[in-house]
Image (cartoon, grey):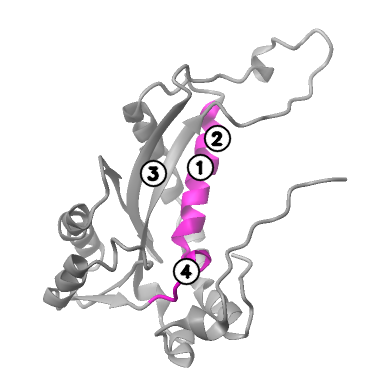
Amino acid sequence: MCSRPMQQQWTGSVDRALGDLSALDDLDFDWRNDIFSDEVIVSITNDSTALVYCMNGHRYDERFVRRINKSGCVRVACWGWMSYDGAGLLERIRGRFTAEVYEHILANIMIPSARKRYPEGTLFFQQDNHPIHTANRIQRWFTRRRDVDSVDWPPNSPDMNPIQNLWAAVKRTLRSNWAEQPPVRTPEELWDRVLDAWEEIAKNLDPFHNLVDSMPRRMRGVDAGGLWTRY
């Protein structure tokens, strides 16, 4: 049997992976108070190969026909956040993603929506080390916001962010509903379906509880000397 190798994110040495984190302190950090965020691109292409098994004479049965988009590719870029208490707001990114765009999202999307869920106290906000996230403009914004604490994050560690699992669930939901819906032809149609998938997943809080409660295990996976984690 031959199969493609599994892919895992390389984090480098333990010291480098932990970066500026105080490992022992953060292993006991209460991640249930944290807001996890990130961007993702959702695309529909005609390039992927799928295999189906059907009886002779049923090749053109609707169950075994794969719809494709004439344009070949439709995609949308999204930003979103989640916490222990469920899915946050999902925002579409139009055009180029810049520090100015990201500051707008933080000030006008993240803060108002997070405050509806957590009206008091400090917002503990997680973001990875994407160059836009660490731009001087964004760092100055966090300095001005005394009510938001940006949690330090290890470099090269996207597998530690539970929102990556949420993005995967959104894409699985899209695929599972695909056969029952007409082909997507425009980014607007795809965005509507991404929103529907996000809202469908948001109905059940258990996955969010499990993802956030996995954070100490993710941290230990790095702190114990593993150069990648299973997440």
Q: Position of residue 3 (x, y in %)?
A: 78, 46
Asked if residue 201 lies in the magenta stretch, the reply is no
Residue at the disc numbered 3: 199
Q: Which residue is nearer to you in this view: 38 or 55?
A: 38
Residue at 74%, 25% (x, y): give it: 52
Q: Label 1 neighbourhood size at 10 Å, few (<14), some (14-19), many (20+)?
A: some
Name the kind of residue labelled 1 in the image.
Lys
Residue at the disc numbered 2: 175
Q: Position of residue 46 (x, y in %)?
A: 55, 26
Q: Position of residue 34 (x, y in %)?
A: 35, 72
Residue 56 bears which disc, if any? Answer: none
Residue at 79%, 24% (x, y): give it: 53
Specify the principal SS of the magenta part: helix
Q: Does label 1 or label 4 sit earlier along the sequence?
A: 1
Residue 171 bears which disc, if any? Answer: 1
Whether the residues at callouts 2 and 4 have beta carbons within 8 Å, the answer is no
Name the kind of residue labelled 3 in the image.
Glu
Q: Can you say which quadrant of the picture contains the C terminus?
A: bottom right
Asked if residue 161 lies in the magenta stretch, the reply is yes
Q: Which residues are magenta?
A: 153-178
